[in-house]
Image (cartoon, rainbow, N blue to C red):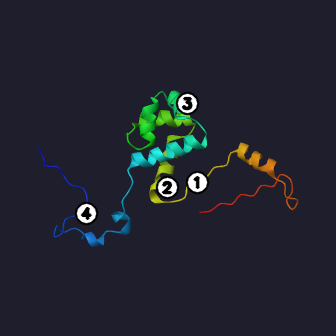
Amino acid sequence: MSEPTAIGPPAEGSGGPSPRASTARDRRARPLLRTTLGDVLRRVRRAQRRTLADVARAAKVSMPYLSEVERGRKEASSEVLGAICDALGIELSDLLVEAGRLAEGRAPVVRLDLARVETIRGRESSPARRPGDVQCLLAA
């Protein structure tokens, strides 16, 4: 049986780049994928104003298990993640992209659906604006 291999920067004198040659990004602590995925799932669920029980029922997982996934304490399989995404009405690929953005510290993409735009239009009261005009501030 072979010995376990350590993954990390090469030891000094091993012929590889020195630890000082690593970038700041490499030295920065990276969050666990399960933690980041859980954060995104919780944000989406809360944005939809849905309960753990509701989403767990729709995904056919237990409520305590979904809670553990959202808190990053359980490593969900791709099948379970897919079921949770289906229950939330999002694509698994969108979950992964959003998790990548959070892990890299980039701002999330905010999608405005038609219902939200209609709500904004309904609140339009400024006489300087024409009825139906909607202003949206986007930041990158």
Q: Which of marks 2 and 3 precedes in the sequence?
A: 3
Q: Which residue is mark 2?
A: 101
Q: Residue at x 77, y 55 (%)?
A: 134
Q: Which of marks 2 and 4 precedes in the sequence?
A: 4
Q: Which of marks 1 and 2 precedes in the sequence?
A: 2
For residue 54, which numbered disc appears in the image?
3
Which x, y percent locates residue 111?
Answer: 63, 49
- Vertical position of residue 55 compared to residue 13: above or below: above
**What amino acid type is highlighted by mark number 2?**
Arg
Which x, y percent locates residue 131?
Answer: 86, 53
Q: Residues within 10 Å of mark 4 (few under 14, many from 20)?
A: some
Q: Which of marks 3 and 1 precedes in the sequence?
A: 3
| Distance of label 1 from label 3 (alpha carbons) | 25 Å
| Distance of label 3 from label 2 (alpha carbons) | 27 Å
Q: Are marks 3 and 2 in contact (CB under 8 Å)?
A: no
Q: Which of marks 4 and 1 precedes in the sequence?
A: 4
Q: Are marks 2 and 1 in contact (CB under 8 Å)?
A: yes
Q: Which residue is mark 4?
A: 9
Image position of 94 (left or right of 13)? right
**What amino acid type is highlighted by mark number 3?**
Asp
For residue 109, which numbered disc appears in the image?
1
Q: Residue at x 44, y 55 (%)?
A: 103
| Distance of label 1 from label 4 (alpha carbons) | 34 Å
Image position of 91 (left or right of 33)? right
